[in-house]
Amino acid sequence: MSDTHMADRLIDRLSLDLRPVRPLPGPGRRAALWLAAVCLIGLVLAGFSDLGRMWARLTATPDMAMAAAGAAASAALAAVAAFMSSLPDRSRLWSLLPLPTVALWVGASGLGCLRGYALPGTIVEPPGDGMSCLVFILGFSVPLSALLVLMLRRACPLNPSLTAGLTGLAAAAAAATLLNLFHPFDAAATDLAVHGVAVALVILLNRVLGGRLLN
């Protein structure tokens, strides 16, 4: 039996049980599906929120509106960056995509702390109430992170920790955006610090746990 014939038989045997592989949807499409889930959660929560009061609070000063817009944009761009970074043929520079909106989010929140007047209809958050914001961001970040990791499992990221960190940023930014529905407080240094700690914890946990799942 010739070597060519043996090779053909081996190829036939190896390919006997092969099944066609379904290609993954594009990163933009998968990010849009995840964002649609976030919007669905937002619609449900809106039914329990005072939307008029929230709108008045966000439009009273530019810093509040810019901070909310920065958080929402950070969630969207971090999700796109996470899906991009999960593909081995994409550049790691995609991980920088959410940096401008994160800077807007943090910068506008910091400007609110420097404002010399209080927004009408709001109060400065009491020290003890900061825990509720922490619990809210952490609580909603867990299912949003889990959904993102589940959607990323079929990909093959070359740097799982980086992809998981972007997943955490997307989930934390989305949770911080949803928090605006139930956040009747003016900007304050303690409020910004609590939100920063919550976002950092979500990113850290995702890098540790999500990175292992994506490895």
Image: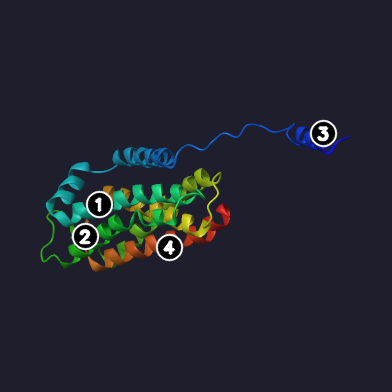
Give 101 or 183, whichever is nearer the viewer: 101
- Percent coordinates x, y for residue 74 in the rendering: 32, 52
Q: Which mark is residue 191?
A: none
Q: Taking 73 as reference, is 170 left or right? A: right
Q: Check contact, mark 2 vs mark 1: CB within 8 A.
A: no
Q: What scheme was used to colour the molecule?
A: rainbow
Q: Which mark is residue 68?
A: 1
Instruction: From the image, state whether disc 3 or disc 2 is nearer to you.
Output: 3
Quadrant of residue 132 in the image? bottom left
What kind of element bears circle 3?
A: helix
Q: Check contact, mark 3 vs mark 1: CB within 8 A.
A: no
Q: Residue at x 40, y 50 (%)?
A: 81
Image vertical order of residue 17 relative to residue 191, above or below: above
Q: Residue at x 23, y 43 (%)?
A: 50
The residue beneath circle 3 is: 5
Q: Residue at x 20, y 53 (%)?
A: 66
Question: What is the CA distance from the residue labelled 2 to the residue labelled 4?
Answer: 21 Å
| Residue kind at label 1, given as amino acid type | Ala
Circle nearer the N terminus (2, 4): 2
Circle nearer the N terminus (2, 1): 1
Question: What is the CA distance from the residue labelled 3 to the residue labelled 2?
Answer: 70 Å
Q: Taking 134 as reference, is 149 left or right? A: right
- Please state, as top left, top right, bottom left or bottom right, where the N terminus lies in the image: top right
Question: What is the CA distance from the residue labelled 3 to the residue labelled 1?
Answer: 67 Å
Quadrant of residue 122 in the image? bottom left
The residue beneath circle 4 is: 201
Q: Taking 62 as reference, is 71 left or right? A: right
| Residue kind at label 2, given as amino acid type | Ala
- Please state, as top left, top right, bottom left or bottom right, where the C terminus lies in the image: bottom right
Circle nearer the N terminus (3, 1): 3
